[in-house]
Image: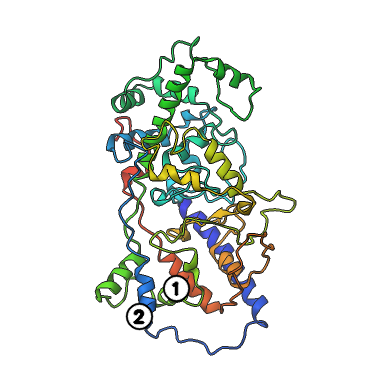
Amino acid sequence: MTKRWCVRARHTALGCAALLFWCASQASRAPAQEPASTDAPVEWSASERARVLTLAPLPPVPDDLTNPVADSLAAARLGRALFFDAGLSRTGTVSCATCHDPELAFADGRPTGRGLADLTRNTPSLLGAAWQRWYFWDGRADSLWSQALQPIEHPDEMGSTRLQVLRHVAGKETLRAEYVALFGPLPALEDQARFPPQARAVPAQVGDAQHQLWRDMAEADRLAVDRAFSNLGKALAAYQRKLVGGPAPFDQFVEGLRQGTLGNPAPISLAAQRGLKLFVGKADCRSCHNGPTFSDGEFHDVGLPVASSGARRDSGRFEGIQKLRADPFNAAGIFSSAPKGERASDIDYLDSGGETWGLFKTPSLRNVARTAPYMHAGQFLALDQVLHFYSTREGARPAGHHGETVLEALFLTPQELLDLRAFLESLSQPDPPAEWCRVPDAAGQ
């Protein structure tokens, strides 16, 4: 039995239990309705058809002008080697793939992540990450490459330092050769007087001894280290841009609908078609989950329950914007290839006032059936629990002053909930090409 099957089976069992509980609790509250025929063809109005056609296909992976090697095959191969290399962590035990496991749709199947220590937020999947505008639940990174750098130095994730990581790359012949071929020579790390092994950039802890060693380095040397570190992020981003699967059954359905060539049977079930009709109609899920990525790319407070009793409420986007502006590797910084570009200019227009407190990014729904648990702190273990929450608003925390006000309980029938789940399952895509889902061999292939 594979690990992927075990995780899915566990989530399915939990989801079924949640659905049965919901059915029992709502039986006396839902109005009596005539059961809908489950084998009648689904009819589409002109407006429904127009809405559906906006949801597929996915456009080409967007350009990233901040990263000059974004579409370099050589950079993607170096990035793949780095992604699976636990030597980038302080202990040599944690790699990017620890939390973004190819067997688990490049997530980890846990409510909240675990690197060197337990984390407080759910691990997002990296599938389709190249289409995102902001990264992490709080949007504290504005490019795929700056996102890739942060876990490396986070004390609870990989716990390393940029100097340690660069020394690791310099010490492995294949990595060093691939880096030099792409970016030129590494800094002279063998000179420990100029590049102290214990030096660590910790701007938030100015009194830290390791940070003081970093500040004592010559400015040109710090700049050289930062430049090389950013290059590693850009290689990792080039790899992550390859994590794109083929068309989902839903995409095939939309193409048939667009061309008027739907087969019999259609690429998705009648249940999934009914769920899609709910999605673009009565349930109005597309208000936030719109476009081919099924996300508006914005940040919202939907009144989620806190993850555990006594847990501190997460500030979300409020601190995320502050961290983004302070990040030397943001799109407007000197390590960006487009510091005056459109992506960089967005930073100037971000409003970091109190209305951003507790807001979290709308995740994509593509591959959602493969990436349980759900929400920013893994509050829901199964997809049925998510649907139950949005249908009933049961357990919803009163949203803050700037929380969403459009969410109302719909009290969908058990059949409608099953139909919505069937639709969401139709968004699962085939895995990316196998070469990008495995550890490279000794030859780097």
Question: What is the spatial separation of the Cα atoms under label 2 and label 1, in whole angstroms?
Answer: 12 Å
> Which labelled disc corresponds to residue 280?
1
How many C-alpha atoms fall within 10 Å of the one at disc 1: few (<14), some, or many (≥20)?
many
The residue depicted at 59 percent of the width and 65 percent of the height is 385
The residue depicted at 37 percent of the width and 33 percent of the height is 81
Q: Residue furthest right?
A: 310
Q: Is residue 200 visible?
A: yes
Q: Quadrant of the C terminus?
A: top left
Question: On screen, 19 above or below 363?
Answer: below
Q: Quadrant of residue 391?
A: bottom right
Q: Position of residue 194 (x, y in %)?
A: 48, 12
Question: On screen, 33 above or below 164?
Answer: below
Q: Position of residue 166 (x, y in %)?
A: 44, 23
Question: On screen, 182 above or below 266?
Answer: above
In the image, which is nearer the foreground, mark 2 or mark 1? 2
Instruction: Tell me the residue that label 2 is attached to.
Output: 46
Q: Quadrant of residue 411?
A: bottom right
Q: Is residue 143 visible?
A: no
Q: At label 1, which amino acid type do we have?
A: Val
